Image (cartoon, rainbow, N blue to C red):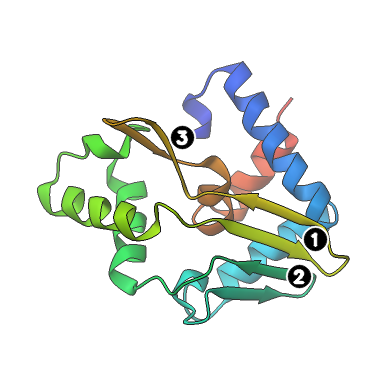
Amino acid sequence: MKFNNLSHEEKLEIQKLVLECMDVVGGRNHFLGMIESIKESDQHPLLNKTGKFHYPNGTITWGKQIFKEKVMALKNMFIQHLDDNILTIKNEKLNKEIKNCLKTMGKLQFTIRSTEGAEFTFPPFKTIDANNVEITPLFQIIFFDSLNNTKRILDYK
């Protein structure tokens, strides 16, 4: 998802989704603080063996460890691939790695639980059909996008 390339309606839809998650986390500052904690962690949070990431105002859980190759494949995909459909990657090696990533992470659910007990759950991927799978916007925003891009989404009018 390249936010700048989306239509006005799509941008508003993604903003609405982020705002829903932001409310559960405890507001704008807590949401941005969560993302900042993710960016500042020594290793990528998805690599945690416990399948959990603790930040000052809550916890993100996903149930199982994700190996470094999968996280690197996702990072490379965001850099090299412009299309939303992640099954159309032209680089054969990266395509194979992403398909393996789909097998590993496809059924996972990510749950953000605030210290107040509120929860927000989202999947990492959205299957449109057998030949079209996309990364969910929240998964990308929380774990891979820059803080500036997240602020741009929140401030969009």
Question: In the picture provided, is 65 more to the left or to the right than 93?
Answer: right
Q: Give the mark nearer the N terminus: 2 vs 3.
A: 3
Q: Residue at (82%, 58%) from the top-left corner?
A: 118
Residue extending farthest left: 92
- Residue identified by numbered label 1: 30
Q: Are marks 2 and 1 in contact (CB under 8 Å)?
A: yes
Question: In the picture provided, is 128 more to the left or to the right than 41?
Answer: left
- Residue identified by numbered label 3: 2
Measured as percent of width and height from the top left, residue 81 is found at 29, 40
Circle 1 SS class: helix
User: Is 104 situated above or below 43?
Assistant: above
User: Is 56 situated above or below 28?
Assistant: below
Task: Residue 73: name its quadrant.
Answer: bottom left
Quick one: label 1, few (<14), some, or many (20+) residues within 10 Å?
Answer: some
Q: In front: 53, or 91?
A: 53
Q: Give the mark nearer the N terminus: 3 vs 1.
A: 3
Circle 2 SS class: strand
Q: In front: 20, or 102?
A: 102
The quarter of the picture where the C terminus appears is top right
User: Is 1 situated above or below 11?
Assistant: below
The quarter of the picture where the N terminus appears is top left
Measured as percent of width and height from the top left, residue 84 is found at 37, 33
Q: Nearer the viewer, mark 2 or mark 3?
A: 2
User: Is 84 situated above or below 36?
Assistant: above
Q: Are marks 3 and 1 in contact (CB under 8 Å)?
A: no
Q: Residue at (33%, 73%) from the top-left corner?
A: 68
Amino acid type, label 3: Lys
Q: How many marks?
A: 3
